[in-house]
Amino acid sequence: MAVKKMKVLIADKIAQKGIDYLSSNGLEVDLLTDESRPRLVEMIPDYDAIIVRSATQVTAELISAGTNLKVIGRAGVGLDNIDQVAAKEHNIAVVNAPEGPSQTVAEAALALLLAVAREIPRLDAGVKSGKWLKKSAKGVQLGGTTLGIIGTGLIGANLLRLALAIGMKVVGYDIIIYDELVKLENFRYVETLDELYAEADVISLHVPLIPPTKHMLNEEAFNKMKDGVIILNCARGGIIDEKALVKALDSGKVRGAGLDVFESEPNPLAELVNHPNVVATPHIGAVTKASQENVARITCVKVVEELKKVN
C-alpha cells in the first residue's frame, strides 16, 4: 500500500531514481535549495522524513525541531553526520545504504593501490612533461604479497575478492567473523591487529570513524608494521594520525599511501597530500553513476518502508 500525504525533504543531492521512487509511492518530495538551507530548522517541522548525504548535519537541534519527523535517511555508508542518540530519543528511525557503494569503493581502493605500487601519477606526469622516467621507476608487483584488511564488511569483503583475483594473499581483522569469507582460499582472519601489522605488505582500512578507531593508525601502530608497507584509506578521515603518517612516509617505514579521505576536508593536511609518495583523491570512492543510483534507490526504499509502518 502506497504512503499517502507524507512529505520528504531531500537535503543533499541524490540520484533521480531515488526521487522517482519516492514520488511513485505517493510521497510529496521537496528539494532543499542553497537559498533555503539557512532556514532548515524552521522548515523541518513540515516533513515526515529527511534524506541527506554527508553535507547536511542532522544535529540534535534539527531533530528536536522536526516534530513530525519519522525517518532520517542517509544516502551513503556511514552515519557520522547524524545524531543517532537524539534520533533514538525522539523515536525516529535512521536508515542508510551501506550495500549501495560497496563494489565501487572497493574498486577505488584497488585503483589507489595500483597507482601507489606502480608510481602511476609520477610516471604519468613525467611522460606528459617530456621526461622518460623509466630508469627511476621502482614499481612493486602485488601478486604474492599480503594485503591486510581492517574491517571485512561489505566494502572490505569486495576488496578482499579483488585482491585474491590478482594473486594477493589476504589477512583480515574484524570484531565480526564472516563465515562466508573464512571459506575463501588464501584468506584468513588474524586475532589481533599486531598480527596483521606484522604480516601485511599493504594495509587497507574499512572501519567507521568512532572513538575506538580515531587515530588507530598512529606512530605506535606504524612502528609495528613491515618496512615499506603501503597504506590505503577509503573509509573515513581521522582513522589515521596524519602527522604520524607523514613521519612514517619520510622515514620510509611507509612506502606509499593511497588516500581518498582526510581529517580536514576539503582542505587536507598539505604536507601529507603533497608528499611525493602519496596518491590523493577528493573523497570520490563512492562517486560513480552506478553507485549513486544504487545508494539513492536503496535509501529511498528503506525510507518508504519505514513510513509505511506509521502510515
Image: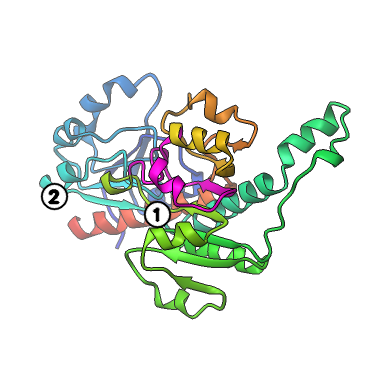
Q: Is residue 209 visible?
A: yes
Residue 296 image position (x, y, % from top left) = 45, 49
Quarter of the image for the C terminus: give it.
bottom left
Residue 221 image position (x, y, % from top left) = 41, 48
Task: Return the residue nearer the eye: 273 or 79.
Answer: 273
Please give left or right for residue 286 compared with residue 125 in the image: left
Q: Quadrant of residue 68?
A: top left
Residue, x 25% and y 54% (percent of image)?
307
Residue 224, relative to residue 45: is it above or below? below
Q: Quadrant of residue 265?
A: top left
Q: Amino acid at mark 2?
A: Asn
Marker disc for residue 91:
2
Q: Amino acid at mark 1?
A: Ala
Marker disc for residue 97:
1
Magenta stretch: give its range: 214-242
Tag 2 secondary structure: loop
Tag 1 secondary structure: loop
The 10 Å Cα crowd at callout 1, few under 14, some 14 to 19, many 20 or more, is many
Residue, x 72% and y 57% (percent of image)?
141
Task: Return the residue nearer the eye: 74 or 229.
Answer: 229
